[in-house]
Each structure stands twice: as structure tokens, then as C-alpha cells.
Amino acid sequence: MSLRLFEGIGVELEYMIVDRETLAVRPIADRLLSAVSPSGGPESEVELGPISWSNELAAHVVELKTTSPAPSPSGLYGPFREHVRRIDAILEPMGARLMPTAMHPLMDPAAEARLWPHDYGPVYETFDRIFDCRGHGWSNLQSMHLNLPFSGDEEFGRLHAAIRLILPILPALAASSPIVEGKVTGLLDNRLEFYRHNCRRVPEVTGRVIPEPAFTRAEYDRLILEPMYAAIAPLDPDGVLRHEWLNARGAIARFDRSAIEIRLLDVQECPSADLAIASLVVASVRALVEERWSSTGDQRALPVDVLEPILLSCVGGSGLSASERSVVADPAYLRCFGLDARGPRPALDLWRHLFHALRDELGPEVDRSPLPLILDRGPLARRILGRLGADGPVTPSEIRSVYADLCDCLVDDRPFG
């Protein structure tokens, strides 16, 4: 029996394994997982009580996720923090550690990427053959995924409508990838910039990141899944990738487990920051589903053509003056959040509005304590650049110094800045 709306949440946090001294990527996820595997071998997923450890695709990435849906994000930072520290203790004798943030700032994936060589090999080999996974959008990206349940078409339609509205402004809250191969690119969310192009050989896989307005399973099959399967079939005649998880939009319907998975959140510097963001995102989606500011009909009426430009601006498409500072001006979009009368506003100001409106629904103060820092000083990417003083070129040694501090933030579970 599937869970109903907001009866549970699944959380996934991805981290990269790096050298403890140099911070170079270390493709030893199999050694890490073998250390806790009942078989003593490199299993791709190991359940360890409420948190499971797993690997997908890149051999230097480990994912921590809730083994079963949790009632809410509240209180989850404790178990995640415990498991981060457990991993750190295992990696230390190997001369390695975990690094947070959504992209390694110095990695050259063409030279350094290694795919997971064990189970799921045929799937990863097919992805690599079609898309070439030696790129930033495949081998150098870490995110937080949120899985929200639904039961039946009516709940799916309401949830999908609300999630489509929240997706465009997620980078304004969670961007943590401002540096690529040692260079400040002018974008705060380079992970999403690479992500939206990484399936360009078969563009139907990612679409325009914002999902099409599909509000029943039949509509979803017709508008999203069947065109995607048809487009990739000539390159995948055996149907290895003909599954819902091939879909790379910013939120994907998983009808196999009656949930929608949100994929546009960069992973943060520590579990408490990730879970605070998760609490605000889930509360905002819930308020939209409950029609507190707008009807689900009005929410469904917003096309991709309205939502996509907001997303691109929040990624940082207009340079460092954009992202969380980008102005959201579309009156129909603002009206869905009850803000049309006050006119255009920066994306981060929209998050401040949501935080103040929903503060009492975000759990105990300790659960939401990282949010005031983000809402005051901007997403992690902005704070990283502030620490680097990135008005001019930055050196690899300066980058390593800042990211070593971020690694410490992860183990200490403390916000950066």
C-alpha cells in the first residue's frame, strides 16, 4: 500500500570521496562499501539501519539515503551526521575523506572519472556508450534528492503541479557549485548547467528540466515517457535504459514506487543544512498542494515557457548578479505564492516570504537553524565565492584551503560562513 501525500519522505545525499591531503578524487567507493557489506564484497547498496549507503555510476561517489521513508525531514540530520562520521572513520586509514558541495572544483572528469565496475555494469556501460559519462554532468555532480509520495492520479496531479512551481527557484536556495576546473565561471549552480545538457544526444531524456504539464499517469506516459523511450530506442535496441529512472527532468515521477523525486537541489556543506532546506522545500510544496495561496488549477496552468526562464536565471544565467538575486517578475507565477500585489522580487526574497509564512511548520528551531544564514547571505555558492574573494582569479591552493574547510564542516555538521 502506497503512502498518501506527505505521509513520508525519502532523502538522498551524495558526497565525493577525495584524498585527505590533496583533495584529489579517489575512486574507492567499492572499498568503502566492502568495509560494511555483510558479504565483505563491493555491493552497490548496504542497509545500515535507518540509513543506507550506496553507489551510482561514479566510483568516487557515495550516497547516503533513508532506508525507508521518514515521517518528515525533522530530526534526520542526526542519523545522517552519525553516518558521515562513520564513513570518515573508515576512510581515514585509507588517506581519504568525504567532500561536500555539488561539484569538485578542480576535477578533470575526462582524465579522472572512473565508473563503478561491479553490479549494474551493463546499465552504466550503456549510459557511457550513448552519452559519454566522462563529463561534469555525469561524473562530477552531487545532489540531494527528495522523494515525496502520492496515491493515485488525483494526488499525483496535485503534487506534480506544486513541485513544477517550486523547481525554478530551488537553485536560489541551494546552489553550491560556483567553480569548474579551478575557474569561477559566473554561474552559481554549474552542476545544473551541466545537468541540463548532459543528455543532449537524446534531448527528450532531460527535456527542458521543468517537466511538461502532465497531471495523470496517462498524460505523463504520453507527454514524457513514451517520447523519451522512442527517442532512445535506436541507440538502445535491447531496452537496457527503458525505465522511469532514465528520465532526467528536475523532478521525475516514479510510478513504480508512487513517488515524485526532486533532483534540482545541490548538496550542501553539512547534513543539518541539507535537512533544513528539505524542510522548507517540503513545507512549501505542501502549502501549494493545500491551495493556501492559489488553486491547483492556477498552478497547472503555468507552462514550461514561464517556468524555464526563472530556473535559468536562478542557475545564474545572467552572471553572478543573478541566481538568488535574479528578479522573479511573472505575475501569474507570483500570484501562485500570494505575492502578485507586491510586484517583482528577487528569488531569495520569495524564499524569505515562504520561510516566514511557514516557520512554525519547519519543526524545532534546531532543525531550521541553518536557514537564516542562507536567507541572509545567500546560497552556499555565494558564501564560497565570498570566502575566496573571487573578484579576480583564484589559485588551486586557495580553492583547496576553502574546500578543506568545507570537508571539516561536513564532519562537524556546521554551516559554512
Image (tube, rainbow, N blue to C red):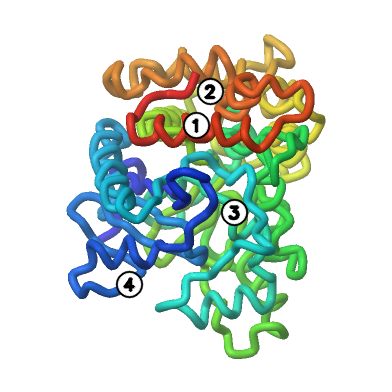
Residue shown at 32%/57% (left/top)? 53
> Disc 1 designates what residue?
288
> How far from the left and from the top, in percent, is residue 405?
47, 29
Label 1 vs 3, first from the N-terminus:
3
| Label 4: few (<14), some (14–19) or many (≥20) C-alpha neighbours in 10 Å | many
- Disc 4 marks which amino acid? Pro
Q: In the rendered structure, which amino acid carries the disc numbered 2?
A: Trp
Q: Name the residue under label 4.
A: 42
Query: What is the number of callouts on the image?
Result: 4
- Sequence order check: which comes first, mark 2 or mark 4? 4
Measured as percent of width and height from the top left, residue 377 is found at: 57, 15
> Would residue 136 appear left or right of 288 to someone viewing this image?
right
Q: Nearer the viewer, residue 266 or 243?
A: 266
In this rendering, is residue 166 above or below 90? above
Q: How crowded is mark 2: few (under 14 residues within 10 Å), some or many (20 or more)?
A: some
Query: Mark 1 touching mark 2, by CB under 8 A?
Result: yes
